[in-house]
Image (spheres, grey):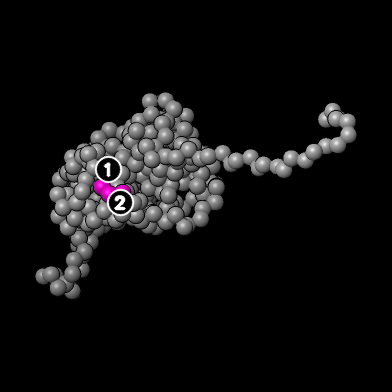
Amino acid sequence: MKKVPLSKDVDALVIARGTPGFSGADLANLINEAALFAARYGDKKIDQNHLDLAKDKIMMGPERKSMIMTDDQKRITAYHESGHAIVGLMVPEHDPVYKVTIIPRGRALGVTMFLPEEDRYMQSKQYLHSRIAALFGGRIAEEIINGKDGITTGASNDIEVATGIATNMVTKWGLSDLGPLKYGEDDSSPFLGRSASMAPKGISGETSNLIDTEVRKIINTNYKAAEKILKDNLDKLHTMAETLLMYETIDADQIDDIMAGAKPRAPKDWDEPKAPKAKRTKKTSIKGPAEEL
C-alpha cells in the first residue's frame, strides 16, 4: 500500500479482516485491482470503495452485468440470497454477513458473502451446524415464496457443500452420535506411496446405513432450524429481498437496518434515479373567443 496514493478513508485493518488467508501475492493483486478501478473512475487516489470493489472481484468473481435476467429470476435470486443472509445472521457462531448482491458474478446469479472476524484454524461442531443451516436458507426462502413446486436448481451447490460437511462430520471428524471413529479411507494417488492394487477399506452394509442415517439427521435438523428462523422473520425476508431488487447490492449497514426493523438506508455510492424531464410543447396562438376545456 505504501507504493500507491491512498485516500484518508482507507483502513488497513478492515482490508486485513476481509482477506483471511491471502498471501503476499494475493494482497499485491488486490492493490493492483484497486488501482485499476481508481483509474477507470478517473480518481487520483485509491479509496476504500476501490479496495472493496477489488476485493469483491477477487473473492466473488467479476461482475457479469451483461447477463440479462428476467424480473422473475431477479426476484427468486433476491429471496434466495436473503435467505442465506438472515439465517447466517441468526444462527450461533456463524461469520457475520459482509455483503449481499444479486449481480451475477462468475457462475453464480447472486452471492452472499460472510466475513470472518479472525482466521479460523479449527471449526467447532456448532459452527459447522450453523454453516449447514445457512446453506439451506436460500432453498427454504424459495420454497416459502413459491411453494415446493417453485423451488429452482439454484441451491444445487449449497446442497453439495452442506452434504459434504455433514458427511465429514460423521466419517472423518467424529462429530456425530456414531462417536470418534473414522470410516473409509481417503482417495490417494498410487504415486504417493499407495499401491494401485490396494482396495480401499470396506464398510459393511449395516455401517453404511448408520452413516447415511446420521448424515440425514444432521441435514434435517439444520434444515428445520433454518426454516423456523425464516418463518419467524418473514417480514425481514421480504424487506431484504425488496431492498436487493432496488439496489442490487447491500452491505453491512443496510443489513443492520433491516435486521433492526428500520428502513434500510441507501448505499453510500447510490445515485437516486432522476425523473425524466417533461417534454416541452410548442405554444400556438388561438384565435377567436376562448373556450372552457
Crowding at dot 1, Cα within 10 Å, few <14 / some 14-19 / many 20+, comes out as some
Residue matched to label 2: 38
- Left or right? Give the position of 153 relative to 15: right
Q: Nearer the viewer, residue 133 or 31?
A: 31
The x, y position of residue 18, in whole percent, is 23, 44
Mark before the other along the chain sequence, 2 or 1: 2
- Amino acid found under the numbered disc labelled 1: Gln
Name the residue rendered at 14%, 49% in the picture: 2
Viewport quadrant of the C terminus = top right
Secondary structure type for disc 2: helix
Residue matched to label 1: 48
Q: Nearer the viewer, residue 103 or 161?
A: 103
Picture quarter containing residue 271? top left
Picture quarter containing residue 203? bottom left
Reply above or below: 111 against 255. below
- Start and end of the magenta stretch? 43-48
Q: Residue furthest top?
A: 261
Crowding at dot 2, Cα within 10 Å, few <14 / some 14-19 / many 20+, comes out as some
Reply above or below: 53 against 273. below
State yes or no: residue 9 in magenta.
Answer: no
Name the residue rendered at 31%, 44% in the picture: 49
Q: Nearer the viewer, residue 151 or 195?
A: 151
Which numbered dot is residue 282? Answer: none
- Amino acid found under the numbered disc labelled 2: Ala
Per the model, the C-alpha gap separating discs 2 and 1 is: 10 Å
